[in-house]
Each structure stands twice: as C-alpha cells, then as structure tokens.
Amino acid sequence: MFTRPYKIFVGKDDTRTQGVADGANINTLVQNIEDLEVVVLDKNKMVMAAGATLADTDTIYICAGTGDTFDYTEETGVTPVTAARRIIFSDPIEGALVKSFVGKAYTVKAEQVSTLDLTGLTVTEGTEYVLRVVYKDLDEHPGQFVQTKRYIATAAATIDTVGAALVASFNADKGRRVNATYTVGTDVITLTGREIPDCCTTLTDIDEFKMVEFDVFLNYVDASDSWAEWGAVKVTTAAVHGNGNWEQIRDLEKIALGYRGVSNKTHFPVKTPGLATTIDETYDVIVIEHDKSYRAPDNQYGKTTILTTVIAIPNSLVVNQMDTILTRLNPWMASLPGAFPNVAL
C-alpha cells in the first residue's frame, strides 16, 4: 500500500522567465514558462508574488514546464495559442495541513575507504598471504560475493613485495568492485569502492543507486593449512551517499512515475515520460510534507491523506531559480500555523 505518495519537480539553474511575472494567469504561463522552469502558484493557479502569506492565499501549487508543447484551436477554427507548453502540477498544498518544510543542500557522495597497515609484520618464505574482500551491499545475502587474491612469499620477499603483489593481483581482476593501492615506505594497502556501473551510468539504469560496501581481511595460511589473521591494523571510513546527487534525483523521478499512472516496468519497451534529471548535475532539494483534505465517498465526511512534494534545483554558485522559489515559499511557510523557519540553500 502506498503510505506517502509524492510528486517531484526537477528544474534547471536559470533566472525567472520575464513573461512569468507575479500575478500571471495560466494562459500567460503556458505561453511563457520554459522547460524545467519551476514556479509557485497561488490558490487560483496564478503566479504567486514574493512575500505572499497565508492571508493572501490559503493554498499553493508547485508547477513545472515540460519539454512538450501544443497548439490550442477553438471550435471556430481559430488558433489563439500556439506552442503552449504543457505543465505538470503538484497536489494542492493547503497551508493549514502542511506538516514539514525542509531544505537539503547538495552534499557530495564518497566511496568507502579501508586501509590495512602492515607496519612491523614479518614475511616468512613459503607462506601464502591472502587478501580477501567480502561485499556487503548485495540485494541477495550480504557476503555472498567474495574476491580473494593470494601470494606465496619467496626468500627475498619483503612487506613491500607482498603488499605490491596482492594489490597488483587484485587490480588485474576486471570484475573487482574496489580499487587497491599500495604505498611503498608506509606499508599501507588502501582499498576504495568503485562506482557501480549498473546504477550510475544512465537515466534508464534498471538498478537504483547504491554504493559498494565491503569488509577486507588480510590473512596467511598457517602450518595446519588454516587461515589466520596476519595482524594488519584495519581502518575503515564508511561510504557517504550524499544528498542531491543526480542518481538519487533520477531514482526519485522514476519511483514517482507510478503516481502518474506509469505502472508497467516489465513489458519492454516501457513507455514513460522523459526524466528531467541531468546526468552529472548536482541538486539542492526542498521537501514539503502535507496532508490533503477530501470528502470520503464511503461516509461523506472530511478526511485527509498524507502527501509529499519535492523540488530539486541544480546546485551552483548562483542558484537563481532556487532563490526565486524560496522568496515565495519562505514567507508563506512562516505565516502558516506551523510557523516553519526559512530554508536557506
């Protein structure tokens, strides 16, 4: 069961189109709004003015221009509107029913890094040393996929020899999910997660965004032919998924398609509206959680359902469109019963 349906509006970093002036009606809006331009509307679906409060409009809408245009022809055959832009709208955001208003600034993702410090360890001729990486981010049972590399020490082998050999063997594996390096002199093996191509390449990737998570072990084979820890000091910095990375915005868009009636994900080719996310773009995000009032058909009294509206605008040194949006949202949200603090991104 859907517990919190949402709609997402992905914009571009640009200044407000001159024709999309405060107070403009829908007829003016469809003829002037640009593709990926996000606009705040009042209860009459007119462009809301900066500084408007609950006293001015008890309900607002978020809308965005799409890449589709159309011509409007009257019954008389006259076409008063040409190349009008199709617009998508949010559900009504009723001021009295807004529950949360937050902003999430873009934060960069960072892969997991694990280091093995071999300082002070002893290399024994004929001993087999084993570098073993166990992956924990699989949808199947964690730890099901393991990559193991081995090196048997020669008489002249040193810590540098063992470390470099294990790293070279690991990096030669085209199916590896981490990159390995060895720093001569510091006796440190470093393993860094790699970007997963199945979910970080295109807008049509089937898999949702995730990052490599793993554990690493450095063992040796003892006299009883069993594995034992060699004694390396392990330090791990966990992966950081960040916020507002293009893969995350793409996934939000793809999931939200279900709320727009696109439920077929198995019979290819799947026909869907084009996604507005731009590959390699970085986004600041606004999230509005709100209820929607409606008249229940079963008993004819008022009920509410929970909804979420998400706005994603590219992060840059000058985020003009986000500034324009916040000059509308911040005063209005502050005037609500929830008296929500301003969002600054």
Image (cartoon, rainbow, N blue to C red):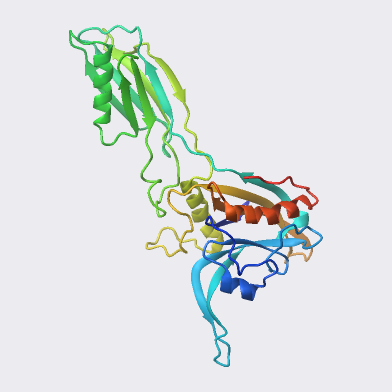
In the image, is residue 230 above or below residue 276? above
- Give residue 162's position: percent from left, percent from top: 25, 16
**Where residue 83 appears, x then y in whole percent?**
51, 77
Horizontal side, residue 102 vs residue 257: left or right: right
Residue 134 visible here:
yes
* Closer to the camera in the image, 241 or 29: 29
The reply, left or right, for residue 111 in relation to residue 42 is: left
Q: Residue at x 43, y 48 (%)?
A: 280
The quarter of the picture where residue 184 lies is top left
Picture quarter with the C terminus:
top right
The residue depicted at 20 percent of the width and 10 percent of the height is 126
- Please tell me which residue lies in front, 117 or 206: 117
**Residue 308 visible from this viewpoint:** no
Where's residue 256, x and y in %? 54, 56
Q: Whole-percent x and y of residue 276?
A: 49, 58
Among all residues in the image, which is located at the extreme left?
155
Between 73 and 323, the residue placed more toward the observer is: 323
| Count of numbered circles on the image | 0
* Above-or-below relation of 343 to 28: above
Residue found at the very far bottom of the displayed protein = 76
Tell me the residue at 48%/38% (across/down).
Answer: 109
